[in-house]
Amino acid sequence: MDLKKEVKELFGRAENEDPGVLAPELAEKLLVAANADESYREKKQYQELSRMMEDEKGKIFLTALTDQCFRSLKSSRVADQICYLIDKYGIPKYPDAYKRLGLKVFRWFGKWLPGLFVPLTKSFVRHETSNLILPGEREKLSRHMERRRKEGVRINLNHLGEAILGEKEAKRRLDIYMDDLINPSVEYISVKISTIYSQISLTAREKTLTALSERFRNLLRAAKAHPFKTHEGKEVPKFVNLDMEEYRDLALTVELFIRVLSEPEFLNHSAGIVLQAYLPDSFGYQKRLTEWAIDRKKKGGAPVKIRIVKGANLAMEKVEGSIRGWPQAPFEDKSHVDANFKKMVDYAFIPEHADAVHIGVGSHNLFDIAYALILMHKNGIQGKVAFEMLEGMADPMRRAVQSVVEEMLLYCPAAKKEEFQNAVAYLVRRLDENTAPENFLRHAFGLKPDTPLWAVEKNKFFNALQDKKLLETYSRRTQDRLQPTQKLSGCCRFTNEPDTDFSLPQNQKWISEILEKAKREKVPKTPLVIGGKERGLEKATKEEVELSLSTAESAFLAFKSWPYTKRANLLRRIADNFRQHRGDLIQAMAMEASKTVQEADVEVSEAI
């Protein structure tokens, strides 16, 4: 079939027809083209992935192997752990016979010859993931990027790395980004704010923004000073994109982006930022960024870019919310994520908005891609939209989409051989994403039109189109320490006291007022009290320590004799008192014991 011709006809119909109606038709054509273009190697790989979806123990084994295989530098220790995993989960069923035999041989001889088998295993894991993780070594990386460029693909380079624990590591990562921008082969990089500053603090917001702003400025200056030369010989400034991580960094990253790019020095400079559709808050931030960018353009500024993705840190956000006693920041229903993605695309593709904010559509879902393609042509905003995918993920689909779009950009994570352990978190997220039941990619391998599975995906698309009309995009996090604290109720089951969510502006204001008060006041003189009697301000003597212990023991015996309802009521009143005076307790710990705000806040929650 002539895909380009058929797609062109669909684009012609877009002027008078609903993009939501045309999108499934285009998605089907893209799927047929992708299936026809699959290589033998890709078919084998996708068949194995499909088998893995049905092998739950095999998936767990692969995740554990990828995670634990690179932890230790001692081969005997790694061999022992791999054998333990094989004994625990068994040989996975999904790999081909050759790979299953390799695992059996490792189980038989790995512990006896770890110096031989462990390096082979590590090399095998790196090879199996080489289509997802690029080599971080400069020469190998440059060769890969040049090969992709000849295919008509732009590269968004993302250096994977471990968490930054100090300024020395932050400086090293900043140097890596600077080296990328100097490298003639690199056109576009992604930067996470947590990798360029180690002391990010939501309770010291202004200080954090000041430090981040200076480092972001340096990256933008380097991007401008070392332009990228296209195949046509044209020199263009390199592109710096602020990546998005955890929910707590969302407001900070947006504020940093707006603050620096509002400065006269960067008025004519383009840069990008990522917004995640699985966060309800993202739509509000998209509107704020768009309104700012329109105003910036009126002043003669260059367009900026927003990359819209669905989000890839759901498991981590769930865990944090559960541990800290907060609502989960992302939507709980995947259909709402899909609806918000389309809602954000609709808003972004309004011509006036697209003039000031160019858009990157980051998705592997053919229905979403088709919808965005048709809407782009309907609104006449070609040249202002790029379609973005992950390196090594569903390449036949990528090639099919690339054949009908103006710009294809690949998000390419890279790690050096000795830093491969740092790439494990990314690999686990991708594995989790690919195998999640509600994810399009879970069903994409072997997917064909006019099948029950295709009908299910089509219905999901239509449902999301309907949901976007009524979707509420208010933050799921509403905690407000500025408001009066509600008393504890004894009618419900026990739940831990939530910590303070310092990512919320109202809570930042609350703690700021407390710290300002602490600066104005002197440390109060607190007398020693034993048995309800004040005994002076001096350090306690040995006799007073003994008296304290004996008083506590006597009180315990008396307390023990009370009915449980009386004891419960007393403890509830004490807990309520702690809740009412959380700010005072944090202030006291900060002034008297030099506790940080976050440490003190957690201790108050534990006490309650």
Image (cartoon, rainbow, N blue to C red):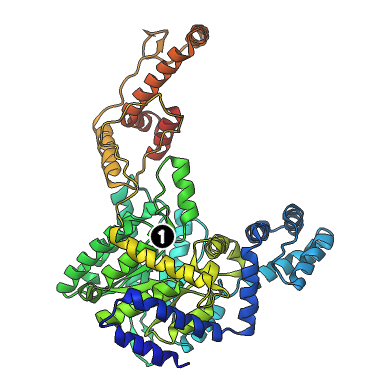
Q: Nearer the viewer, residue 170 or 322?
A: 322
Q: How many marks?
A: 1
Picture quadrant of residue 392: bottom right
The reply to whether residue 242 is in sight is: no
Question: How far from the left and from the top, in percent, is residue 256?
Answer: 30, 60
Q: Is residue 362 left or right of residue 67?
A: left
Does residue 59 sit above or below 570 in this rendering? below
Does residue 553 sit above or below 451 in this rendering? above
Residue name at image x 61 percent, y 64 percent? 53
Picture quadrant of residue 94: bottom right
Q: Quadrant of the C terminus?
A: top left
Does residue 169 sit above or below 445 in this rendering? above
Q: Is residue 478 left or right of residue 86?
A: left
Q: How many residues crowd around disc 1 within 10 Å: few (fewer than 14), some, or many (20 or more)?
A: some
Q: Is residue 243 left or right of residue 124?
A: left
Q: Nearer the viewer, residue 425 or 592?
A: 425
Residue name at image x 37 percent, y 92 percent? 233
- Mark 1, residue position: 335
The reply to whether residue 96 is in sight is: yes
Picture quadrant of residue 174: bottom left
Question: How far from the left and from the top, in percent, is residue 200?
Answer: 38, 51
Q: Nearer the viewer, residue 474 or 272?
A: 474
Residue name at image x 44 percent, y 82 percent? 401
Amino acid marked by disc 1: Ser
**Residue extending furthest left?**
299
Question: How far from the left and from the top, in percent, is residue 527?
Answer: 36, 15
- Secondary structure of the residue carrying numbered label 1: helix
Question: How far from the left and from the top, in percent, is residue 102?
Answer: 78, 68
